[in-house]
């Protein structure tokens, strides 16, 4: 299981005693994570970047929502740390001189 899956499904519920996302929303969140891992192999790196960033944004929202709702302020660092991954993720995917510089360089190295 992915660490963020553990954080969202198990640990968050234990900290807050509030039901975490389940059903269709959890399926969509997990699908975003999976797409972000599989799309680079298809050459669709901008879509992978979008899926990866959307996953992190949604995960940050869900964790933060639970912390605020339960008023478990001592757990707020978890949402903050995941939120810090969002700009790092964007920089990772867009590094370079052009709009998607890293994506173009990475794509040319793998898919010749």
Image: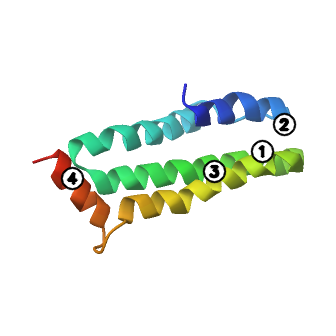
Residue that lies at the very extreme toward the left in this rendered image: 112
Horizontally, is 105 left or right of 63 in the view?
left
Is residue 98 something that shows in the picture? yes
CB within 8 Å, label 2 to label 1: yes
Q: Secondary structure at mark 1?
A: helix
Q: Compare marks 1 and 4 and give the one earlier in the sequence.
A: 1
Q: Compare marks 3 and 2 and give the one earlier in the sequence.
A: 2
Residue highlighted by disc 1: 66
Quadrant holding the N terminus? top right
Residue for point 59% across, 50% down: 58
Q: Position of residue 82 (x, y in %)?
A: 63, 50
Residue for point 67% across, 36% down: 8
Q: In the picture, residue 5 is in which quadrant? A: top right
Q: Is residue 47 above or below residue 26?
A: below
- Neighbour tally class for label 4: few under 14, some 14-19, many 20 plus, Cα within 10 Å: some
Find the distance from the CA under tag 3 to the CA under tag 1.
14 Å
Q: Secondary structure at mark 2?
A: helix
Q: Position of residue 67 (x, y in %)?
A: 81, 47
Q: Is residue 60 above or below residue 20?
A: below
109 or 8: nearer the viewer: 109
Find the distance from the CA under tag 2 to the CA under tag 1.
7 Å
Find the distance from the CA under tag 4 to the CA under tag 2.
42 Å
Residue highlighted by disc 2: 16
Q: Compare marks 3 and 4 and give the one earlier in the sequence.
A: 3
Residue highlighted by disc 4: 107
50 or 87: nearer the viewer: 87
């Amino acid at each position: 299981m992915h660490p963020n899956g553990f954080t969202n499904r198990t640990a968050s519920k234990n900290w807050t005693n509030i039901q975490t996302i389940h059903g269709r929303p959890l399926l969509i969140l997990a699908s975003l994570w999976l797409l972000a891992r599989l799309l680079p192999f298809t050459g669709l790196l901008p879509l992978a970047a979008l899926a990866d960033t959307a996953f992190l944004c949604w995960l940050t929202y869900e964790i933060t929502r639970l912390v605020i709702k339960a008023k478990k302020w001592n757990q707020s660092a978890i949402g903050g740390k995941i939120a810090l991954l969002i700009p790092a993720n964007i920089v990772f995917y867009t590094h370079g001189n052009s709009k998607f510089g890293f994506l173009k360089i990475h794509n040319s190295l793998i898919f010749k």
